[in-house]
Amino acid sequence: MARSRRRVVICGAAGRDFHNFNVVFRDDPSVQVVAFTAAQIPGIAGRRYPPELAGPIYPQGIPIVEEATLDALCMSERVDQVIFAYSDVSNAHVMRMATTALAAGSDFTLLSPRSTMLQPSLPAIAICAVRTGCGKSQIARYLASQLAARGYRSAALRHPMPYGDLAKQAVQRFSSMADIAKADCTLEEREEYEPHVADGGVVYAGVDYAEILKQAQTEADLLLWDGGNNDFSFIDAGLNIAVVDALRPAELDGHYPGGVVLDMADLLVVNKIDAASDEQLATVAAELDRLVPGKPRVMAASPVTIDDPAALDGARVLIVEDGPTITHGGMPYGAGYQAVKSVASARIVDPRAHAAPEIAAVFARFPHIGPVLPAMGYGPEQLAALAQTINAADVDVVVAGTPIDLATDVDLRVPVVRVRYGYRDAGEPSLMSHVDEFLSTAGI
């Protein structure tokens, strides 16, 4: 006899998975979500999606288990369908997950933007990318500042990063550093929220994006979706911007769901052309012509500045970079390394020889990383390991390529010099010319 409820597992990384559940499955009595599986983010597995968020069909909440157990889970729980719901993994990885699910007797599904996007009542602009680390966040901040100069109130909806108490993080609003401190944010969360707040912006994040959207719309004229990884937006934006990294010209459609972002885009921003070679620029142009011919493009620079370049002169330097960009984003280094290389007398110290065990495990998992330290701080233990690694190195200065003020978040024995990166048009048409056209058609 057929079972009355379809049994589902959602594979995720504490973000897209929760959103897909909330929007598609939470109130569906014909479905029983038996578990979430966790990947990419340490410390997520072993917890439960709380009943306050899971809804009345799930009075005990939903367990979150390690992704490595997926095949056994599918068989022991007689799972009918596996939903894949996280981002910036290779297309081959997605098919490996599909193979695992199919071999265990379960269907394998990717939910579409149409199935998962929320409908805003305000005009919305989504800033997404084909890979992690393309420069979405500085573009979102640039747009917020330009919109403010035109008299518009914008609210940034940040792709979810709920690594703490999920029930308390259902809806989060940040408009001051005090808000961020009160929320006990991880280093990775601070990297995304602090720059917006420092620029005078308002950021929303959390778990329940229907409620987040509802609240954000009460104080804004329009919405900015500040994407995470290479995921597509949770809201149905009138203007979809896809950011492409000129330093990775061949990585446009090989990582899920970056190809979806590219194909859905109304406008492409080819970023970091100031750091790219002629060969890289030619390759990215040819690839875009092949994949999305005729789609409008903006050429952009990502200028890097050093707060105190004299402090690097002749110094032994340890470089800390944005964590996700350097780990699952696949880049060997970021803005910090580029800045230090511009100071000829600076000597870069490789952090591997001084890595605490938890940080050494990160280097082992991501062997592509160069002589830089990813800013890992998903919990107190990892943050302590980061500080231990830095303090064990014999260096004169730390260069922080992460967007936060590392000196205030980590107890360090040496001074920190910050590297900042922004946005600049690198030709015509400008980014704001496209945005102004959208605003005109949106009627605000």
Image (tube, rainbow, N blue to C red):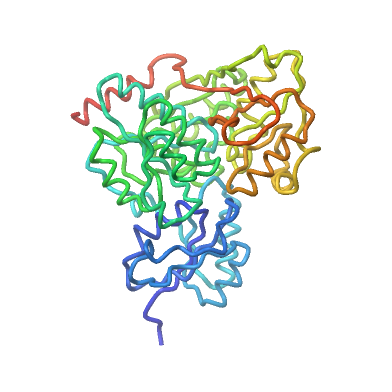
Q: Quadrant of residue 342?
A: top right
Q: Of 8 and 297, which appears nearest the observer?
A: 8
- Would you place residue 108 above or below residue 268 in this image? below
Q: Quadrant of residue 166?
A: bottom left
Q: Image quadrant for the C terminus?
A: top left
- Would you place residue 389 above or below residue 342 in this image? below
Q: Residue at x 55, y 57 (%)?
A: 44
Q: Give the x, y percent position of residue 244.
A: 50, 31
Image check: 26 left or right of 99? Answer: left
Q: Residue at x 31, y 24 (%)?
A: 147
Q: Give the x, y percent position of residue 111.
A: 41, 56
Q: Quadrant of residue 298?
A: top left
Q: Of 123 and 217, which appears nearest the observer?
A: 217
Q: Of 171 and 131, which appears nearest the observer?
A: 171
Q: Image quadrant for the N terminus?
A: bottom left
Image check: 415 left or right of 240? Answer: right
Image check: 397 left or right of 247? Answer: right
Q: Give the x, y percent position of residue 115.
A: 34, 54
Q: Residue at x 54, y 22 (%)?
A: 420
Q: Give the x, y percent position of residue 184.
A: 49, 45
* Residue sticking out furthest to the bottom: 1
Q: Of 45 and 37, which appears nearest the observer?
A: 45
| Label total for image | 0
